[in-house]
Image (tube, rainbow, N blue to C red):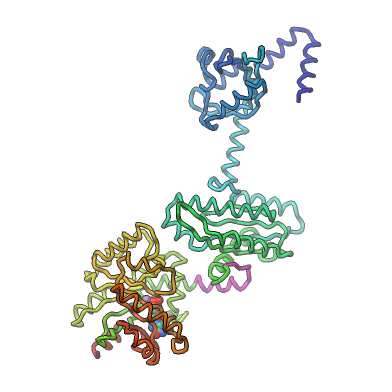
Amino acid sequence: MRTRQTDWLAIIQAEHIQQIEHIEKALNASVILAKLNADGTFAQVNDFFCEISKYSSSELIGAPYTLLRSGFHPSNFFTKIRQTLNQGELWTGDICHRAKDGTLYWTKTTFVPILKDHLLKHIMTVQTDITDMKNIDMLKEIAYYDDLTGLANFRKFKMDFSALQHASKPLPHMCSLMLFSLKDYKLTMKRFGLSNAQTFLQEVAKRLREISEKFDYTVFKLEEEQFLIFLPHTHQSNEYEHIIHEIYRSFRQPILIQGHYFKAEPIIGIIHFPEHAQTFDLLLDRLALTSSYAEKQSDRKVAIYHAQMEEEHKYFLLLESALRRALERDDLELHYQPKIDLYHHQVEGVEALSRWYDPTFKQVPPNVFIPLAERRGFINDLGEWSLRIAAERAKLWNANLDRNLIVAVNISPTHFIQPNFLDQLFQVLEKTKVNPKHLQLEITEDVVMEKSVEMHTTLKTITDIGISLAIDDFGTGYSSFGMLNTFPIDSLKIDRSFVTNIQNDAKKAAILEVMIKLGHALKLDVVIEGIENEEELAILQPFAPKFAQGYYFCKPLPANEFERFIQKK
Ligand code: G
Ligand code: MN
């Protein structure tokens, strides 16, 4: 650079003096020029400087250079430039200025310090307008990169992929794609708020980027917690197995945000190109499908595309539309299983359980259709339906059956944390005019364990209006005994897995005994679930549980059969 500059000077010096004037003219016509005083105020400006800054020369002269400050650069930006110049060195870089009319313009800028006796006397600045170029760069940045994580986005992936395919014609380039997402992300983040969700995603991106650097693959950020991992040549060497291993290792470490530990469980779908799909769109559709399979795995949530997935997918699509239709037409049913008071040998309450019979799909078990409604986003409607029907029954039976009967309804955690859950509950109470005392909600431990203030308030609001709360499947989830004291819980329903095979398992019996004692000590109703025979009941009797449910006493019954059952008692 330096030698070239010197060469130019030599050329100019060798010519006549008028030529320097011509060169000056040329400079003036195409370059933005200014001379600054040592204190950074303008001493002289050329026309081009005025034109681009939209200030007149009289407005500029005497004013500080920072008059053109745009706010784009960090606050110490000009201080750093000044330090360079004070040391007698050139400064070159891109600067974003603000013109008099408020618009922004970019210049490639050089500041030249003019020193006298080692002291800065003047500063010459030579600039060229690069606004258009910068705008294009910034548009590219916005268009191809994710703001939050700085990772390339889906649009960039699409471009890269098509470039790769184009370059490797006539044979398609073989590669693999992984779709990375996180289990229960939306649920967790709904509870912890947007800003925590963003910090969380930044950490997730950071971990994925670290692994990507190790394995030389690219990570793209898709929507929300979805990331796309592009493996250029790997599917034959099964390198993706190592990557998955690394991802799992990395995400075993919980993410700490503002005192909360977030467990991030990866869900990974994998597809190979062109083996599994030959076009871009098909590739992505099938990858999404594979990911939804991965999500359903119980252990490691990883799946590789398989043609059979398509068949099953069609089945679930049909099942979904049948379920939606059944809900609309009121074709679902609630069955009722009595809850027995073992001390007084009578029916104390009843648990409402949703049942669905479809002519095509036959009897579909609730552990199939409830998760389906959760995944497909209509658990709200399904939940509202069962609340309403159960409330109608509670109203009717308590009016007609000449006894107090509490009807318990199972509430899916996904439904319970919806922001409009309480509104829905109030609407049901108003519509059905049921006495809240005749209604109980069964929720799971994990919901109650949620430490957020909102959850506490929601639970309290529910019990304040007189509805009681039971913890369902107690002992299977994640709970601390401390919470039994702090939360307004009325009842513990001990999961039936503690009863199954109790005859042959002394440990189970010991655990049950302790749970019953604990519940009673905390003045909670304890309900033993899933008693199927006399033998099981006999083992339990010495622990004196007050309430029990199970096939041994009665299976869940349709409403009319339940009425007959209870009238016989
Ligand atoms: O999670 P929850 O306790 O709400 O589950 C209730 C389910 O357990 C219902 O589907 C019901 O039919 C079933 N159930 C009720 N009693 C018994 C029983 O004694 N044995 C078994 N295996 N299942 C039962
Ligand atoms: Mn239940």
Q: Residue at x 26, y 74 (%)?
A: 392
The quadrant in which residue 125 appears is top right
Provide residue 205's location: percent of width, then percent of height: 57, 52
Provide residue 196's location: percent of width, then percent of height: 46, 51
For the N terminus, give its image quadrant.
top right
Q: Which stretch did the figure color magenta?
A: 301-317
Of 262 and 374, nearer the camera is 262
Tell me: 203 left or right of 338: right
Q: Is residue 198 visible?
A: yes
Of 554 and 23, nearer the camera is 554
Q: Is residue 355 visible?
A: no
For the C terminus, give its image quadrant.
bottom left
Q: Residue at x 47, y 66 (%)?
A: 375
Tell me: 273 left or right of 262: right
Q: Can you say whether 71 is above or below 506 in the image?
A: above
Does the magenta-highlighted stretch encompass residue 313?
A: yes
Q: Residue at x 76, y 21 (%)?
A: 5
Of 177 and 249, nearer the camera is 249
